Image (cartoon, coloured by chain):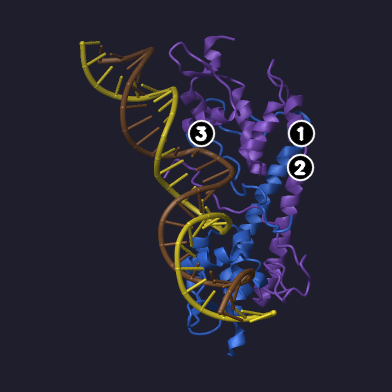
Chain colours: A blue, B purple, C brown, D yellow
DNA sequence: GTGAAACCTCAAGTGGACTTGAGGTCAAGG
DNA sequence: CCTTGACCTCAAGTCCACTTGAGGTTTCAC
């Protein structure tokens, strides 16, 4: 492991596309670890890039940083994680994604009929559907649409 | 329009599943309007339920409250909105949803191969894929996965 | 040797969508 | 008459994932 195998925070940022401030933040949360140079600068091992890739992917699947940190804590400290380690952590995401996709498809299909009818409410439409009809369904009325997936795209491009 | 056609905030909350505090908040943002009783209490018209249904649906599609408010401002003030009005507003959501679904499917399919290989990074894997490889792609390197759809389900059930 | 760039820490700010709390009013039932 | 509970306003707090800023040190190229 030569010195050039260790990345400074700027280098890691450039290679990962994650802002230095975010990297420090991640380290605070325990998602990342670093050693320090004599003058106190962070030195990250190269496999931190893979860790970051995992973090990104997990975020895309909808995990919070806390959940991700918890998952990462199950990695062996002693050795560089293997592909099998990563595969283990990401098992289960598939199902999660399937659910999210199904929820969105339901929304889209509901929307398909709604655009025709313009109803956008009441039991004819599963697009929104609060429990109108004065509790005709009892307390455990219609569940709302899966609240998956809010929030629009964020400023991701540094360009512009 | 009899008095019973007007809903108090509690009643509206119960029928819509939206918390009173949220309803007041929406009114502040201009998503909702109300008249007031002599003693200053809010009275909502019944079609506010449909407005709320629209808000919910729009949120599910990924719009912010500001965007929703803007859309709602294009509704005619004078009359109760028609189905055609609602349909007009929700046109365009379809495409948005299609995009979101496609993004998620790409993520899932990428994941499929990654679970096998455990790579979870580098150019072999489109699950995460920051621009590693020291800018081999130039400044306009791989765009990250669509950052659609973060954040997990929120406490939606009052039950429990 | 000097100035810019890169790094450090720690505290506070941001944005979106609300909720919570303090402090007060009003209507209805017993 | 009194209490309970539904409602009011306005300010501040919460959560998540970061970013920004102030104030200070180190490293590097010239």
* Residue A117 sits in quarter: top right
| Disc 3/disc 1 C-alpha distance (Å) | 27 Å
**Image location of residue B143, percent across then percent down:** 74, 62
Mark 3 or 2: in front is 3
Dot 3 lies on which element? helix
**Could you tell whether D9 is left or right of B130 in the image?**
left
* Residue C29 sits in quarter: top left
Residue under mark 2: which chain is it in? B
Residue behind mark 1: A115
User: Which residue appears at 45% of the width and 40% of the height?
Assistant: B158
Dot 2 lies on which element? helix
Residue under mark 1: which chain is it in? A
* Residue A84 sits in quarter: bottom right
| Disc 1/disc 2 C-alpha distance (Å) | 9 Å
Density class for disc 2 (Cα within 10 Å; few <14, some 14-19, many ≥20) is some
| Disc 3/disc 2 C-alpha distance (Å) | 27 Å
Is the same chain shared between marks 1 and 2?
no
Q: Quadrant of the C terminus of chain B?
A: top left
Residue found at the very far bottom of the displayed protein? A2
Residue under mark 3: which chain is it in? B
Q: Earlier in the sequence, mark 3 or mark 2?
A: 3
**Image location of residue A42, percent across then percent down:** 52, 76
């Amino acid at each position: 492991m030569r010195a050039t195998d260790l990345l400074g925070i700027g280098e890691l940022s450039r290679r990962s596309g994650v802002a230095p401030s975010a990297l420090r933040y991640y380290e605070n949360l325990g998602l990342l670890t670093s050693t320090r140079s004599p003058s106190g600068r962070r030195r990250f091992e190269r496999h931190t890039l893979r860790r970051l890739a995992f973090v990104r992917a997990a975020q895309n699947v909808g995990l919070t940083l806390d959940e991700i940190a918890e998952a990462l804590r199950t990695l062996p400290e002693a050795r560089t994680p293997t592909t099998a380690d990563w595969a283990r952590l990401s098992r289960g995401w598939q199902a999660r994604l399937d659910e999210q996709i199904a929820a969105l498809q339901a929304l889209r299909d509901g929307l398909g009929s709604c655009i025709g009818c313009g109803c956008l409410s009441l039991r004819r439409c599963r697009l929104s559907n609060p429990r109108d009809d004065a509790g005709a369904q009892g307390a455990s009325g219609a569940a709302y649409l899966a609240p998956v997936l809010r929030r629009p795209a964020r400023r991701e491009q540094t360009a512009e």
